[in-house]
Amino acid sequence: MFDIIVIGCGFAGAVAARKFAEEKNKKVLLLEKRSHIAGNMYEDMDINGIYVHRYGPHIFHTNLDYVFEYLKRFSDWFSYEHRVLGRIDGQLVPIPFNFTSIEKLFSEEKADIIKKRLIEIFLDRQVISVMEIMNNSDEIIKELGQYIFEKVFINYTAKQWGIPIEQVDGSVISRVPVVLGYDDRYFQDKIQVMPKYGYTKLFEKILNHPNITIKLNCNAAKKIKIIDKNVYFDGEIYRKPIIYTGAVDDLLNYKYGELPYRSLDLVFERYDVTNFQPCAVVNYPNEEDYTRITEFKYLTGQVVNGKTTILKEYPLHYNIMAEKGNIPYYPIINERNLKRYEMYKADIERTGNIFLCGRLAEYKYYNMDAVVDRAIKIAEEVDV
Ligand SMILES: Cc1cc2nc3c(=O)[nH]c(=O)nc-3n(C[C@H](O)[C@H](O)[C@H](O)COP(=O)(O)OP(=O)(O)OC[C@H]3O[C@@H](n4cnc5c(N)ncnc54)[C@H](O)[C@@H]3O)c2cc1C
């Protein structure tokens, strides 16, 4: 007999399951609707002998020491600093925009003026937002802000979210960073690493505990019914805790309507060359239909001569019934959708024994480290 049911086997479900199994000595039943563990972090080896992330590239970065300490128990890790280039006006330049980007895109004389002004105005700050640049009273700096907004941000965002350019919310730009210097790392976090043997192996270790039983190909939303405040599992009333990491609209049979997401068509291509591009990710903000290309061997650290595998990401409308675009990737956060989410959440919380955890269950964009943090905390708080 099980003490707790955990639904979904991404970081949220796997870490929670391990905590209950190991630290609370509870018998855990873990249900996963896909045919594999590791959620969206899942990777496997393709015919080129290269490990590919089947649901898009995942790079681990965090400032939460304790989260990394926890994960270190289950894998060795190697240091990996992620670098991204963007194709702007036919040139590959560092993203976030930095001094090298400015030097590549402007004449030497103009680039010198811009860099000098940036240093004078923003003194010893290392990272500023495009918004601050655009709102500056200095004409040259303002013009730079407008250039970055147009060339790096606006088309990319419209493409990513499938909206006309006029509808791109200006407030999002406050988060777009510009680096005042030559630091070309994509993330600034103090810990930037990748699991040495890949994410799938990491998950195998997390889940390797005698108290955890995993059932794959099992859609828990078909097994759980919520009627009034009561939870039924396989037709029987169920009062023990359930950690649910799937989508809440699915669990409640879409009673308040679907929660909208943006999806992706992920197109893998293989080439008989050692390297397709100069770094792991190249962004295509403007002309192309895809947003970025990832070359996996940079992420895995593998040395494979004469062959490489890349991934092109084409953003798509999410439709659960469609052949392409049927995976919910990015929640579309706006007032209307959050209100709908809150209605689902309230129904689920009324049960008293279903606890929501993770990117789908909380309808939130979460990085991996934040999900691990949340799963650890939920497992510590929930009484079994
Ligand atoms: C394209 C992309 C790239 C990303 N890159 C990064 C990155 O570089 N770095 C980073 O930190 N974060 C990244 N993220 C975020 C990262 O994917 C999430 O933080 C992580 O997946 C969250 O884990 P989770 O367990 O909440 O969700 P998931 O990994 O999605 O796991 C949920 C699991 O629940 C299962 N499930 C759902 N419903 C049911 C059901 N009814 N019954 C049974 N099982 C069910 C699903 O099949 C899935 O396996 C990226 C996200 C996307 C979309």
Image: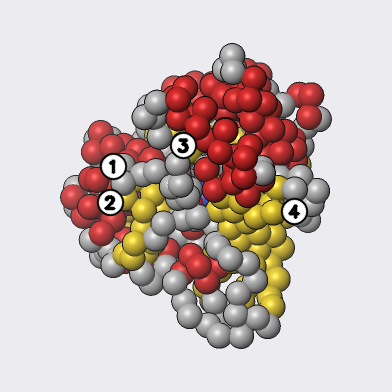
Quadrant of the snapshot with the C terminus: top left
Q: Amino acid at mark 3?
A: Leu
Q: Is residue 353 visible?
A: yes
Residue with the mark numbered 4 = 90
Residue 141 position by quadrant: top right
> CA separation, marks 2 and 1?
7 Å
Closest to the observer, 69 or 20 = 69
- Residue occupied by mark 2: 68
Residue 56 picture location, percent across and down: 58, 57
Between the residue at mark 4 and the residue at mark 3, the CA separation in whole angstroms equals 23 Å
Q: Nearer the viewer, mark 1 or mark 3?
A: 3
Q: Secondary structure at mark 1?
A: loop
Q: Please name the residue shown 64% across and 30% down the image.
A: 144
Q: Looking at this view, is 244 or 285 the one in front?
A: 285
Label 4 crowd (10 A; few <14 / some 14-19 / many >=20): few
Residue appearing at x 40%, y 34% in the figure: 126
**Does dot 2 land on a helix, a strand or a loop?**
helix
